[in-house]
Image: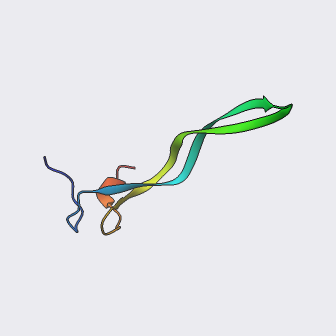
């Protein structure tokens, strides 16, 4: 396989986002007449892609960013 590579030789990149939203569900229950809330975390939702950087040298991957 042939992979796109950074100038430093790395073929691994990082997608950078400036916003992370977290999906949740809130279970409402009652115990001894008191209302209890329990948060169930369903994972992160990414938003607002900023760009790509090399995972090794951390410089911008300009060719990948050109497509944004």
Is 42 on the left-hand or right-hand side of 61? Answer: right
- Identify the residue shown where x is 52% and y is 42%: 45
**The residue positioned farthest toward the right in the image shown:** 33
- Seen from the viewer's position, the closer of residues 48 and 39 is 39
Q: Residue furthest left?
A: 1
Q: State whether residue 35 is above or below residue 54.
A: above
Question: What residue lies at 81% left-to-right and 34% top-to-bottom?
Answer: 35
* Total marks placed: 0
Residue lying at the far front of the rendered structure:
32
**Residue 53 position within the rendered picture, expressed as x and y whole percent measured from the top left:** 36, 61
- In the image, 68 versus 30, the foreground residue is 30
Which residue is nearer to you in this view: 10 or 35?
35
Which residue is painted at 32% across and 54% down in the image? Answer: 64
Q: In the image, is 37 to the left or to the right of 15? A: right
Q: Residue 9 sits in which quadrant?
A: bottom left
Q: Percent position (x, y) of residue 10?
A: 23, 62
Relative to 15, is 44 on the left or the right? right
x, y percentage for residue 34? 84, 35
**Residue 32 horizontal/vertical position (percent):** 84, 32
Taking the spot 30% from the left edge, 66% from the top edge, the residue there is: 56
């Amino acid at each position: 396989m042939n992979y796109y590579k950074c100038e430093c030789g790395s073929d691994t990149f990082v997608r950078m986002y400036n916003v992370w939203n977290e999906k949740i569900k809130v279970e409402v229950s009652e115990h001894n007449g008191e209302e209890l809330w329990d948060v169930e975390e369903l994972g992160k939702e990414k938003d607002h892609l900023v760009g790509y950087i090399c995972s090794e040298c951390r410089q911008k991957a300009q060719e990948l960013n050109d497509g944004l």
